[in-house]
Amino acid sequence: MENDQPTFEKLSFKIERIRHLMIIAASVYGLESKEVLVYSQELDELIIQFQLQDK
């Protein structure tokens, strides 16, 4: 059975991509916009996945 967990490299890339998109969304829509909130939540989930892989 294959492990469907993303690698550290893939997670790092996704984290940086979402972080970048969140910064752009914040500059366009404002820090309290729905778009920024969605990116922030996705970023939180990716960071948790990254931290759990280290264990």
Image (spheres, rainbow, N blue to C red):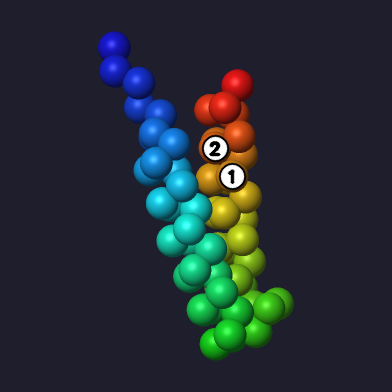
Task: Indicate the amino acid at tag 2.
Answer: Phe
**Is 29 on the left or on the right of 15, as rendered?**
right
Numbered disc 1: secondary structure: helix
* Residue at image location 60% in from the left, 71% down from the top: 36
The quarter holding residue 23 reads bottom right
- The location of residue 4, given as percent across then percent down, is 35, 27
The N terminus lies in quadrant: top left
- Residue contact at pointers 2 and 1, CB within 8 angstroms: yes
- The location of residue 25, given as percent across then percent down, is 54, 78
Depth check: give the residue in front, 32 or 6. Answer: 6
- The location of residue 49, given as percent across then percent down, is 55, 36
Residue at image mark 2: 50
* Residue at image location 46% in from the left, 47% down from the top: 12
* Residue at image location 53% in from the left, 28% down from the top: 53
Q: Which residue is at the far left?
A: 1
Q: Is residue 8 above or below residue 28?
A: above
Q: Which residue is at the far top?
A: 1
Depth check: give the residue in front, 16 or 30. Answer: 16
Q: Is residue 39 above or below residue 4?
A: below
- The location of residue 31, given as percent across then percent down, is 68, 78
Residue at image mark 1: 47
Task: Indicate the amino acid at tag 1.
Answer: Ile
Q: Is residue 46 above or below residue 33?
A: above
